[in-house]
Every structure is written in C-alpha cells, then in structure tokens.
Amino acid sequence: MTERPKIRLAVLASGGGSNLQAILDACRPPIGEASAPLYNLAEVAVVVSDKPGAYALERAKKAGVEALLLDPKGFPDRAAFYQKAVVELQSRKIDLILLAGYMLKLEPNIIKSFQGRILNIHPALLPKFGGKGMYGHFVHEAVLKAGEKESGATVHVVDEEFDHGPVLLQNKIPVLPGDTAESLAERVLEQEHKLYPEAVAAYLRKIFG
Ligand code: GRF
C-alpha cells in the first residue's frame, strides 16, 4: 500500500515555543509510553515568527525544520505583511496553520486564504477569559480574580475576532487553593502540551478524512 503524503503544517510563534515543541515531538515516532498523535499523519514544514530572536525559531532549526522570520516592520501595513505570509505559506503547500503563542492579530486576507485551516491554543476555558489583552499572565490573573473553580486550555478554529472561533477541544484542571498566576500558568501549560497535538490530529482526521 502506498503511504499517504503527510499533511503539511506551518506553526506561527512569537515566543518560546513550548507548544511548537509539543507539536514537533508529536510528529516523531513515539518514545516509550509517550503518545505521538501526529506521527505518520503530519509534519511541520515551516515555523514562522514575527519576532527576531524568538526561541521558537531555534527550536525549529534544532528539529531540522525551516525557520522563517517575517517581521511586520518591513511592511507598509499589516495587510501587506499578511499578503506576503500567504504567498510564503502557499508556496510551501501548507495545509494547516497552527498559532502557538503567536501575538499578532491575523488580518482577513490570511484568514480567507486559509478558511477553516487555522487553529489556535488559548490558556483558559473559552469563551471565558479570551479576547484582546487576554494573554500570558493576564489570563491567569483574571481567572483567579473571578474566583473560578477550574481553568484549562482550549483549541479553537481561528476567525476574525481574537480567541473567538469554534472550540474543538478543551482540557480542564482545578484551580487550587493558594494558586498564583504563575502556578496556574504552569499547570495549564502542561495541559496545553497534551491537548494541542491531540486536537490537531482529531481535526486533521475530520477535515482530511
Ligand atoms: C501559551 O500559553 C498559549 O496558550 C498562548 O501563548 C502561550 C505560548 O507559550 N497562546 P509557548 O510559546 O508555546 O511556550
């Protein structure tokens, strides 16, 4: 039987890229007990960052994956920046875009070019605690301030509003007495690393059969 070609992923990341790492690892053969939900299914074809020096670019190089810096500073406006991004992604035959700690808002041109083919991970249980300004420690501080009993991570399809499109999968964890934004962030991030590869694999099976 001929093997089916792997689905080509692009990961967009502005920072450290621990979620990128989880996706890269999930594309490799499983080691021991660890699961590798994207093995034989998908590969990361390119990692794109808007931030020179982002550690995500180093992670890509270490994994032997193309690392592409696309700095919006070099473009007259965001629409032009994303037009260039679309050209770069289409020329690499990207099937699905994963946002992994990507801090810039997407413009309609890239969303339309990859309609239903862009996913994001958010460190809270959407639709709560999402939207403009809800990133990093702000999310976890808001969860604690609201006295929530649980938090978690959400993977969703990206639309034109921040943290807004259809939810694909969530992992919940309890908020513990004495939790700080840092301790909660750490436990949510652990969940993110499990959730994102699983959600991507499930979504790929759904849209590509
Ligand atoms: C994660 O918490 C993710 O949910 C959010 O940004 C953070 C990125 O972390 N969108 P990392 O760069 O993947 O380590």
Image (cartoon, rainbow, N blue to C red):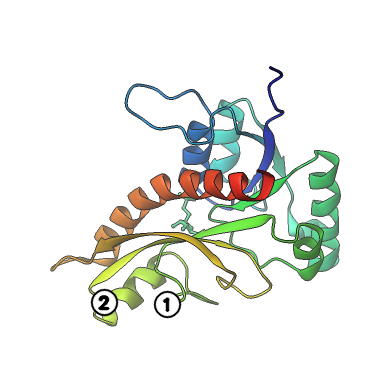
Picture coordinates of residue 15 (x, y %)?
A: 53, 51
Residue found at the very far top of the displayed protein: 1
* Residue located 73% across and 45% down the image: 95
As rendered, which of 3 and 172 lies closer to the eye?
A: 3
Q: Distance between the residues labelled 2 and 1?
A: 10 Å
Q: Quadrant of residue 145?
A: bottom left
Quadrant containing the N terminus in the rendered view? top right
The residue wearing badge 1 is 128
The answer to the question of whether label 2 and label 1 lie on touching residues, with beta carbons closer than 8 A, is yes
**Which amino acid is tagged 1?**
Lys
- Is residue 45 rendered to the left or right of residue 79? left
Q: Can residue 47 be seen at all in this image of the molecule?
A: no
Q: Residue 144 occupies which quadrant of the picture? A: bottom left
Q: Label 1: few (<14), some or many (≥20) within 10 Å?
A: few
Q: SS class of the residue under badge 2?
A: loop
Query: Quarter of the image holding residue 78?
Result: bottom right
Note whether residue 28 is visible: yes
Q: In this figure, which residue is indicated by the disc labeled 2?
A: 148
Q: Measured from the top left, where is residue 103 in percent x and y?
A: 59, 62
Q: Give residue 18's position: percent from left, percent from top.
A: 46, 44
Q: What residue type is labelled 2?
A: Glu
Judged left or right of residue 68, residue 13 is left
The residue that appears at 31% across and 54% down in the rendered structure is: 186
Residue drawn 48% across the image and 32% down it = 25
22 lies above or below 72: above
Q: Which mark is residue 192?
A: none
